[in-house]
Amino acid sequence: MGSVTLGAAARATIVGFSALAFAMILLPALAPAQDGSVEAGADVFKKCRACHDVGPNAKNKVGPLLNGIIGRKAGTIDGFSYSEANKKAGAGGLVWSDEVMFEYLEKPLSYMPGTKMAFAGLKDPQDRKDVIAYLKQFK
Ligand code: HEC
């Protein structure tokens, strides 16, 4: 006596609502590097284009082509002649995850001393998130 008994349907509704509320709280926290904009990233990539190519007919230029770069081991694009620093980073296990790319692009020369990528970096964290979102489209 005195206890509230809920029907199965009511219980299922309550469980459903709490799962939804939980997901709404949790999802944004889980996706810190996923909130880049592809459109804004296309604009940021103009800074990279002088040296890097992407897309179906991409070729190595001053820098390696960047198709499929996210998730790839550093220094492994076919036919590109990397610096020792970039090759060693890959041999040492460096993989271009979202997080690694995010840190590297802030100041490439500090992240990878000895790299021949002559680029000061992208100070604005949003620019870095956007360009990462853009790069992800090219498999
Ligand atoms: C002035 C030319 C230049 C610009 C501008 C430039 N890069 Fe590079 N990038 C290079 C060169 C050269 C390398 C090869 C570095 C080495 O071997 O040390 C490189 C290497 C890289 C790598 C490592 C590739 C691998 O396979 O390990 C990434 C990632 C990268 N660049 C991303 C970018 C992005 C993103 C931008 C724009 C925000 C950019 N770069 C702008 C010249 C440039």
Image: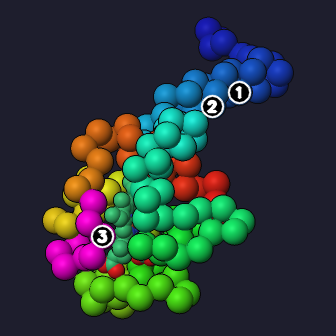
Bounds of the magenta segment: 111-119
Q: Do the residues labelled 1 and 2 touch (CB within 8 Å)?
A: yes
- Quadrant holding the C terminus: bottom right
Cα–Cα gap, marks 3 and 1:
51 Å
Residue shown at 37% from the left, 37% from the top: 126
**Disc 3 beta carbon < 8 A from ligand 1?**
yes
Q: Where is residue 24 in the image (x, y as percent from the top left)?
A: 56, 28
**Number of marks present in the image shown:** 3
In the rendered image, residue 74, in percent from the top left (x then y), is placed at: 41, 78
Label 1 packing within 10 angstroms: few (<14), some (14-19), many (20+): few
User: In the rendered view, would you say 51 is above or below 95?
Assistant: above
Q: Do the residues labelled 3 and 1 touch (CB within 8 Å)?
A: no
Q: Which residue is drawn at 43% across and 65% down?
A: 51
**Residue matched to label 3:** 117
- Identify the residue at image location x=30%, y=86%: 83
Is disc 3 surrounded by few (<14), some (14 to 19) or many (20+) residues within 10 Å?
some
Q: Quadrant of ligand 1?
A: bottom left
Q: Disc number at residue 30? A: none
Name the residue carrying label 2: 19
Residue highlighted by disc 1: 16
Q: What residue type is labelled 1?
A: Gly
User: Which callout, 3 or 2, points at the residue further toward the start of the chain?
Assistant: 2
Q: Which of marks 3 and 1 is nearer the N terminus?
A: 1
3 vs 1, front mark: 3
In the picture provided, is 138 more to the left or to the right than 103? right
